[in-house]
């Protein structure tokens, strides 16, 4: 069971400040989309040639933990985060839009708001004019956003599309077309993520 990371507005604001500080560090990725939820968060970022996502993520989560404990006077109570962060590469085409739609619709899908743009702790809220310390860090998307994007985000995702994204989230499977996934998995050493789960089928050799 995930414990709450954010219980009040100040908790969300404090994390946004940490994220903004992390984006100001050398080699930081570019911020494209995000959504902060009560017990987790999703970020869509562009990693440049100088970006080490593991180092960047470690700085951000450790800093968030330290600042939170200092503010709440809970030093020594342990980390906020357990285990390694999960990430996956995304093809810069319609698959990129699918991921951003999944992220920006997170609060609506969890029934925290009726409309996705009403959730203050997301990139959709900021693009709709909401105030945030992250506004100046938002970078242009590599794919043109459709004119009906707001309606698209608020529309239920097809179940098969939703499952594809969730598989990428949980297993690190690259999200893209078949040929692109194979190339990227081979280049990044992610071939194991493309293999079906479970034991391989037993051979059925017949004795003569």
Image (cartoon, helix red, strand yellow):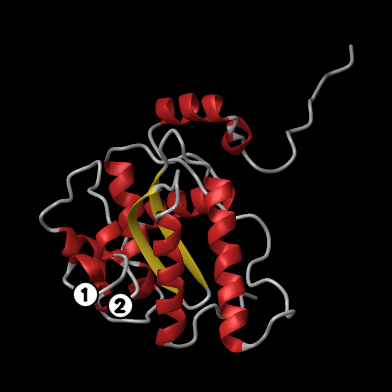
Residue 191 in view of the camera = yes
Q: Check disc 2: other Cα within 10 Å, few if <14, some if 14-19, many if 20+.
A: some
Does residue 133 sit above or below 198 in this rendering? below
Q: Which residue is mark 1?
A: 130
Does residue 169 sit above or below 62 in this rendering? above
Which residue is depicted at the point 32% across and 45% down? 96
In-front residue for pair 146/160: 146
Q: Position of residue 2 (x, y in %)?
A: 61, 75
Whole-Å distance between the Cαs marked 2 and 1? 7 Å
Which residue is depicted at the point 57% across and 63% down? 61
Q: Where the N terminus falls, by quadrant? A: bottom right
Q: Which residue is mark 2?
A: 120
Give SS at disc 1. Answer: loop
* Most distant residue in the top direction: 208
Which residue is depicted at the point 22% across and 48% down? 140
Residue 90, picture quadrant: top left
Residue 154 in view of the camera = no
In-front residue for pair 161/143: 143
Which residue is depicted at the point 56% across and 52% down? 86
Q: Position of residue 28 (x, y in %)?
A: 43, 48
Q: Check disc 1: other Cα within 10 Å, few if <14, some if 14-19, many if 20+.
A: some
* Most distant residue in the right direction: 208
Whether residues under marks 2 and 1 lie with C-beta atoms below 8 angstroms apart, the answer is yes
In-front residue for pair 35/181: 35
Give SS at disc 2. Answer: loop
Mark nearer the N terminus (2 vs 1): 2
Residue 153, picture quadrant: bottom left
């Amino acid at each position: 069971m995930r414990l709450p990371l954010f219980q009040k507005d100040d908790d969300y604001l404090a994390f946004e400040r940490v994220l903004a500080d992390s984006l100001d560090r050398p080699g930081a990725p570019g911020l494209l989309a995000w959504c902060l939820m009560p017990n987790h968060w999703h970020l869509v970022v562009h990693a440049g040639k100088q970006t080490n996502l593991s180092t960047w993520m470690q700085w951000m989560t450790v800093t968030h933990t330290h600042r939170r404990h200092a503010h709440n006077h809970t030093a020594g109570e342990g980390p906020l985060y357990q285990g390694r962060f999960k990430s996956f590469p995304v093809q810069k085409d319609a698959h990129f839009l699918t991921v951003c739609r999944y992220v920006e619709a997170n609060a609506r899908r969890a029934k925290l708001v009726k409309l996705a743009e009403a959730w203050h702790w997301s990139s959709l809220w900021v693009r709709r004019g909401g105030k945030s310390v992250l506004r100046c860090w938002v970078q242009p998307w590599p794919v043109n956003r459709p004119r009906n994007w707001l309606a698209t985000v608020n529309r239920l995702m097809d179940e098969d599309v939703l499952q594809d994204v969730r598989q990428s989230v949980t297993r690190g499977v690259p999200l893209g077309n078949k040929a692109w996934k194979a190339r990227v998995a081979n280049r990044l050493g992610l071939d194991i993520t493309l293999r079906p789960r479970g034991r391989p089928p037993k051979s059925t050799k017949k004795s003569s």
